[in-house]
Amino acid sequence: MQEVITVGVDGTPEATAAVLWAADEAELRGARLRLLHAWALLAPEAEPGQAGQDDQNYWPHRIIGEARDAVRDRHPGLPVDEALVGKDPQIALEEAAELSSLLVLGSRELGAMARYVMGEIGLKVMAHTHTPTVLVRARLGSARGAPDAPVTAGLSLHEPCAALLAFAFESAARRNVPLRVVHGRHLPSYAYNRGGGVEPIVAKETAATARAELRDALRPWQEKFPEVSVDARVELEGAARALLRDAEDAALLVVGRRHKLHFPAPRIGHVVHAAMHHAPCPVAIVPHE
């Protein structure tokens, strides 16, 4: 069965960027692209022959049509499905995500500090779905980036990582680019001496231990994807800071998020939060238990 990539469409520049990125990804995967526009007040479809401003759904049809035309200009042969859904957007996106292999949403930029945010609906959808979600900013939509730009993944060695590594390795393999895996680790408290400096022996031992653990975690995936060149990095600092620095030239940043259904309000975590707000590239958020 052909996989489906669903992208939320609402006529904004951010959504247009998401549509173009999703079309590129669908082409890489050989997947179908589903353009989804949801509006709770969507009217019943117009009678055949009714057009223009007389159609109560004129603007939803126009939004979907413009997204479809943008995809066809970029990927003429890509199979595209169009969905106008008369539901609350959050509900419609969550339902569509569960039937898709990937959900793609637009994310907007605020101000000169280059901070990025998701809308409330997108944030709720991303926090609840089991499906990997990719966030794309308007200024990144039409640019395909350097052809050899790496996929970068942030890896915690104290959380389940199979889903994240599968997504990251597969993404790098499809693009035929290197995979950069970044693990940030704080030094233990005893590494700091009374003068505020760092004991070099402790720092060296901590880094060596982390590198060994990272090699062990990556080994089975490197055996499964021998064609993917892996740059494994241990950074002795906070994971968010290290990841953002090492993703400056990335084509895609992959991060993990806990998905535990018994929490009434799932949290996205500080690393995901930092990536959503500050990463210079599209961000893939992969849920795990």
Image (cartoon, rainbow, N blue to C red):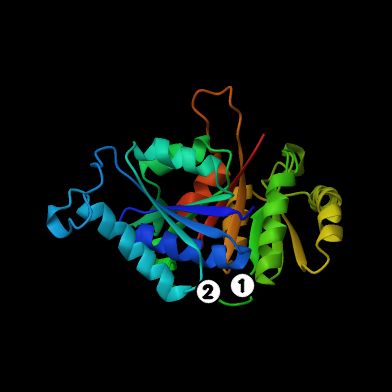
Name the one closer to the observer, 285 or 49.
Answer: 49
Q: Residue at x 73, y 49 (%)?
A: 198
Kind of residue indicated by mark 2? Gly
Q: Where does residue 21 sit, x and y in percent of width and height?
A: 48, 64
Label 1: how many Cα within 10 Å (few below 14, some 14–19, many 20+): many
Q: Which residue is mark 1?
A: 149
Q: Residue at x 60, y 67 (%)?
A: 28
Could one spot residue 236 in this view of the protein? Answer: no
* Quarter of the image where one finds residue 87: top left
Q: Residue at x 18, y 58 (%)?
A: 51
Whether label 1 touches label 2, CB < 8 Å: yes
Kind of residue indicated by mark 1? Ala
Where 276 sits versus 22, above or below? Answer: above
Q: Where does residue 40 sit, x and y in percent of width and height?
A: 29, 37
Cα distance between the residues tagged 1 and 2: 7 Å
Q: Which residue is mark 2?
A: 145
Name the one closer to the observer, 180 or 289.
Answer: 289
For label 1, the SS is loop
Name the one closer to the observer, 150 or 239.
Answer: 150
Position of 3 with respect to 280 (left or right) is: right
Q: Residue at x 74, y 45 (%)?
A: 162
